[in-house]
Amino acid sequence: MPVSSLSSSSSPLSPLCFLTLLLIFITPSECAATPAPKKAPARRHRLLSVDYYTKTCPHLEQLVSSITTQQFRDAPVSAPATLRLFFHDCFVEGCDGSILISTKPGSKVAAEKDAADNKGLRPEGFESIKKAKALVESKCPGVVSCADILAIAARDFVHLAGGPYYQVKKGRWDGKISMAARVGSNLPQANSTVDQLLKLFNSKGLSSDDLVVLSGAHTIGFAHCEHFTNRLYDYRGTKKPDPAIDGRLLKELKMSCPRYGGNTDIVAPFDVTTPFVFDHAYYGNLESKLGLLATDQALVSDARMKTMVQSLAKDKQKFFQAFAAAMEKMGSIGVKRGRRHGERRTDCSVHQS
């Protein structure tokens, strides 16, 4: 489906349209150089590069693009699904494709994807990577990591949804560890405080500006009621709604997400104005108290980040440039290199050994 056909009005959705939208989208249940010259080659070896596969798989980007383009036409939700998959991969064990591993039958150790915090990851994200990997393997067997394919696919979907196209540095190896027990403490939670978010992002080498910019990925995608119901009925134990939520939005969300006994499959868009388009409307929504999650709305309430939110709300190109830079920075978290620490899987869901 072309991006133009996904566009919607820049004005907020009417209550009827908003509720219709809710009902439609129901889902099934190094830094210091050493003085010795002999260390330099090792340092260079660890760097990611745009042309990493130029000789070994020269058409890699075109191969992945052929899959992501078709997948976006068939299932536009693949865009936020794959982007979220990339975030969840990088924040746990680093950007190493460990989120793609399936739990071994009979194993007592569950893989990352089976962690409670990853249960909401949509199958379209996994399917996109599976298809891309199969095509790449048919042309360049045993060469390209699943981690790099995920990074490229995430960029492709951002662009297909109307966002920036940026160069993706490559050279990641796939990780050998995937454990559900390591997920929860390494992912932002819907009820996290700003201080908790900053601590988590700082632990990954990311700044407060990176937090604001990467949160802009919520310009597309949806969240289940369970992630924001407390905002509607009992914000931080007050027995009252979050005061930082627009009254109209509160009413509409309550109609679709009752406190008890509601349909657990119902979702709401993060961006209520242009939910299918990757743009900077997310930040304007925050200024208007239209953020869906408490962690979204908190960005404009905190003095440390408010100025950045306001700046991005005014300038789409600034957001696009900042997002591309932040994605490159995030895409370098915990990169694995070499057989001692990594592998190159032929099947992204199964370890090589």
Image (spheres, rainbow, N blue to C red):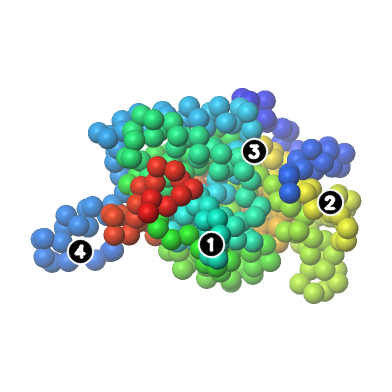
Residue type of the residue flagged with mark 2: Asn
Quarter of the image holding residue 27? Answer: top right
Q: Which mark is residue 263?
A: 2
Pointer 4: what residue? Answer: 33
Gap in Å between the C-alphas at discs 4 and 1?
43 Å
- Say which label, 4 or 1, has the lower sequence index: 4
Q: How many other residues sit within 10 Å of disc 4, few (<14), some (14-19) or many (≥20)? A: few
Q: Residue at x 63, y 34 (%)?
A: 76
Residue 180 vertical position relative to residue 252 in the rendered view, above or below: below
Q: Secondary structure at mark 4?
A: loop
Q: CA distance from mark 3 to mark 4?
A: 44 Å
Of badges 3 and 4, the one in the foreground is: 3
Q: Secondary structure at mark 2?
A: loop
Q: Where residue 297 sits: x, y (%)?
A: 69, 59
Q: Earlier in the sequence, mark 3 or mark 2?
A: 3
Q: Which residue shows up at 73% across the image and 41% down it?
A: 273
